[in-house]
Amino acid sequence: MQDTQNIPLIEIRNLKKYYPVKGGILPHTVGWVRAVDDVSFSMMRGETLGLVGESGCGKSTIGRLLVGLEEPTEGRIFYQGRDLSTLRKNPKEMRRIRTRLQMIFQDPYSSLNPRKQIYEILAQPMLYHEISRRDTIHRDLRRLLDMVGLPETVLGKYPHEFSGGQRQRIGIARALSLHPEFIVCDEPVSALDVSIQAQILNLLKELQAELKLTLLFIGHGLGAVSYVSQRIAVMYLGGIVEYGDAQELFAHPAHPYTKALLDAVPIPDPAEKNRPRQLLQGEIGSSAAPPDGCRFHPRCPWARPQCKNTRPPLQKVCSDPAKQSAFSHDTACPYGQEGSLSEWENIS
Ligand SMILES: Nc1ncnc2c1ncn2[C@@H]1O[C@H](COP(=O)(O)OP(=O)(O)OP(=O)(O)O)[C@@H](O)[C@H]1O
Ligand SMILES: [Mg+2]
């Protein structure tokens, strides 16, 4: 029998998702949006991986591909070592696996059907997938609501009767209701008040530890993401530019884009008001017409002539000069090692 402890719970290999761009008088495909372009990573059971990057870089697309809301253009997704594309011929098994992969959405309001009471929203999928039965559903719902810190009285209400934080708790309860192993949390706190954000982040952290969940935590910036994640992948225009241990990446970013994202994290300390910050030059570019070669090269202070044509392969790099002998866990562009971050600071 296969040892499921040593194989990643989720693995993606060379994943691509291209969307057609329509144009012309008789609409036809005139180009492609390369939303996700050759992304690979893996996640072990019980791990939280943070996925960060600017708006439109392809984070949600990866999330939707992972939970089966969309099909990849190319590449493979493995669940416990099983290639999901080969399971299409077995709809029953596919349905079972789909219940193990869930998603919490950015906007808790539009992701809940406004015409249904919370009872229906939560109970219907549980009964359909035989997670619960008619005679046990009330007990199971009570337990579920208790886990997310909501009283049983919410069951008779509609989504519009709740605050943003409560709605997101319902979104979390819905994701948990089918006993998933893996949850994509797609910017679950960015639509919420700052004070409520901390409560929801703490709730997710507690649930992750209690239920041994594996989470892909998507965010724009590194602040909330680094709070919940053990490892972080940084995305830029459909590709990953740096991937590594969260603390290591925070302390010693190895890629200029990561460094700029870190500098964008606000620090509530007046003494830090005048700290030097790196702002990226130029525009983010478009996934419909991305630059050739390395997509970051027009904004990169370390770009070499060959970066215009070829993407440098991510390599293990030592981002902390004090640790010359002990390589950090980061993988990033190798060219940055020849220019230091202080060189980058001089340029910008
Ligand atoms: N169904 C679709 N049809 C065409 N283009 C799409 C579709 N879904 C996403 N895109 C495009 O793919 C790119 C990546 O979108 P995606 O939603 O994954 O970005 P994101 O990183 O999640 O952004 P945000 O942080 O704003 O949520 C964008 O350019 C977007 O316009
Ligand atoms: Mg998104």
Image (cartoon, rainbow, N blue to C red):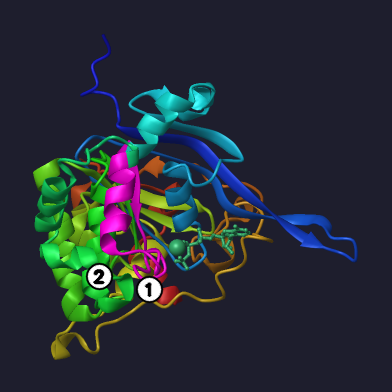
Q: In this view, does 40 lie to the left or right of 109?
A: right
Whole-percent x and y of residue 180?
Answer: 26, 40
Ligand 1 sits in which quadrant? Answer: bottom right
Residue that carries the numbered disc 2 in the rendered image:
157
Of residue 92 and residue 17, the one placed in the foreground of this image is: 92
Q: Residue at x 28, y 75 (%)?
A: 265
Up the image or down, 110 lies above or below 314; here it is below
Which residues lie in the magenta part? 100-127
Inspect the magenta stretch and tell me whether residue 235 lies in it.
Answer: no
What amino acid type is highlighted by mark number 2? Lys
Picture quadrant where residue 253 is located = bottom left
How far apart are the two marked residues, 2 and 1, measured between alpha carbons? 54 Å
Q: In which quarter of the image is the N terminus?
A: top left
Q: Is mark 2 on a helix, strand or loop?
A: loop
Residue that carries the numbered disc 1 in the rendered image:
345
Considering every residue shown, the one lying at the far top of the view is 1
Of residue 264 and residue 160, the one placed in the foreground of this image is: 160
Q: In this view, does 115 lie to the left or right of 175?
A: right
Q: Nearer the viewer, mark 2 or mark 1?
A: 2
